[in-house]
Image (cartoon, grey):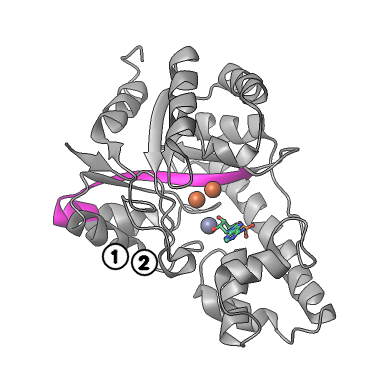
């Protein structure tokens, strides 16, 4: 069978491998296509697409947008949008400014907690890409304050922990619309992180479908087989395309492998065919 991975992060955001390298790794792993979905930026896409064309691997241009949501974490993936679209770029800029407003406040909180760390230490870890909390974690490891990324999140950076600082986000419907308006396909990422009951999730999905949601990320590194079944059923019920990906970040999330997730992830190429049918507006799912 043919497999793909539609959810990866590069050095354009908080992944540790450059976009071109991820594409090479996907080819080496035997995948038939790889989606690049950096947080709040499309800066890695040109390089990924170019490398894909050179080595003969299908690259799906994408993005991952954080949305404001009352429980858990909501991310909306976008695929095939025109990432040079003016309004789309402007909205990404707003999200990027949200990061630059937040980041010094995380440093301040860490300083108050006695961790001697500067914004420069964190910037050095990011190498010019969008700065996310995994870069803080890496800087904290380098300085010897924690041993692992997970420890950095569990003790300091995760929601509810003492150095957590919120950042500007769009509401879910706005995130869906910004992707649609740029001609892209919005997909609800890792529904498990919403921490909703099946009934609650169903009403969230119904609302997003109303706004134009096209897909739901059924297969994901942290989804149990039961969760995958639930999300596949939701996809069917709401005529959404099921998608899937590992959320590969390289060194920032060592336990997740490209294409394979925690070892047993297998996202069929057929999901991508269905997604492209939607893009070409010719199919009923
Ligand atoms: P940010 O976009 O800066 O808020 O950071 C979000 C990123 O941090 C996510 O995409 C993950 O890569 C990572 N992350 C979030 N929560 C955790 C956690 N509890 N443990 C490890 N990594 C996490
Ligand atoms: Zn990330
Ligand atoms: Fe995510
Ligand atoms: Fe992600």
Mark 1 nearby-residue class (10 Å; few <14, some 14–19, many ≥20): some
Q: Which residue is mark 2?
A: 18
275 vs 106: above or below = above
* Residue drawn at x 56%, y 70% as measured from the top left: 149
Mark seen at residue 21: 1
Q: In the image, is 97 to the left or to the right of 246?
A: right
* Residue drawn at x 24%, y 41% as measured from the top left: 3
Query: Residue 10: where, in percent of width, then height?
Result: 42, 61
Query: Residue 252: where, in percent of width, then height?
Result: 48, 67
Q: Let me know if residue 191 appears in the view.
A: yes
* Residue drawn at x 67%, y 24% as measured from the top left: 200
| Front residue of this view, candidates 17 and 255 | 255
Query: Is the N terminus in the top left, top right, bottom left or bottom right quadrant?
Result: top left
Q: In the image, is 89 to the left or to the right of 12?
A: right
Q: Is residue 63 magenta?
A: yes
CB under 8 Å between discs 2 and 1: yes
> Which of the 4 image quadrants contains residue 165?
bottom right
Mark seen at residue 79: none
Query: Is the C terminus in the top left, top right, bottom left or bottom right quadrant?
Result: top left
> Which stretch did the figure color magenta?
52-66
* Residue drawn at x 75%, y 69% as measured from the top left: 106
Query: Residue 84: where, in percent of width, then height?
Result: 45, 45
| Front residue of this view, candidates 178 and 66 | 66
233 vs 150: above or below = above
| Front residue of this view, candidates 238 and 276 | 238
């Amino acid at each position: 069978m043919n497999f793909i991975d539609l959810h990866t992060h590069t050095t354009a955001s908080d992944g540790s491998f450059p976009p071109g390298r991820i594409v090479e790794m996907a080819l080496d792993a035997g995948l038939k296509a790889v989606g690049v979905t950096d947080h709040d930026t499309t800066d890695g896409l040109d390089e990924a697409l170019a490398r894909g064309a050179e080595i003969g691997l299908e690259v799906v241009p994408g993005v991952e947008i954080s949305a404001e949501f009352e429980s858990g974490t909501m991310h909306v993936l976008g695929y095939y949008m025109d990432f040079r679209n003016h309004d789309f770029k402007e909205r990404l800029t707003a999200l990027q400014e949200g990061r630059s407003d937040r980041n010094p406040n995380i440093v301040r909180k860490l300083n108050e907690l006695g961790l001697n760390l500067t914004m420069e230490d964190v910037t050095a870890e990011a190498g010019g890409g969008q700065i996310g909390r995994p870069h803080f974690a890496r800087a904290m490891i380098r300085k010897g304050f924690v041993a692992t990324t997970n420890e950095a999140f569990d003790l300091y950076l995760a929601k509810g922990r003492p150095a957590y600082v919120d950042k500007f986000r769009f509401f879910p419907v706005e995130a869906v619309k910004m992707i649609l308006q740029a001609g892209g396909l919005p997909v609800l990422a890792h529904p498990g992180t919403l921490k909703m009951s099946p009934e609650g999730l169903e009403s969230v999905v119904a609302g997003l479908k109303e706004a134009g949601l096209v897909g739901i990320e059924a297969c994901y590194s942290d989804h149990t087989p039961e969760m995958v079944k639930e999300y596949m059923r939701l996809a069917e019920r709401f005529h959404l395309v099921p998608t899937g990906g590992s959320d590969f970040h390289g060194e920032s999330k060592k336990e997740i492998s490209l294409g394979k997730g925690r070892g047993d992830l297998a996202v069929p190429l057929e999901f991508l065919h269905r997604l492209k049918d939607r893009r070409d507006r010719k199919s009923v799912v």
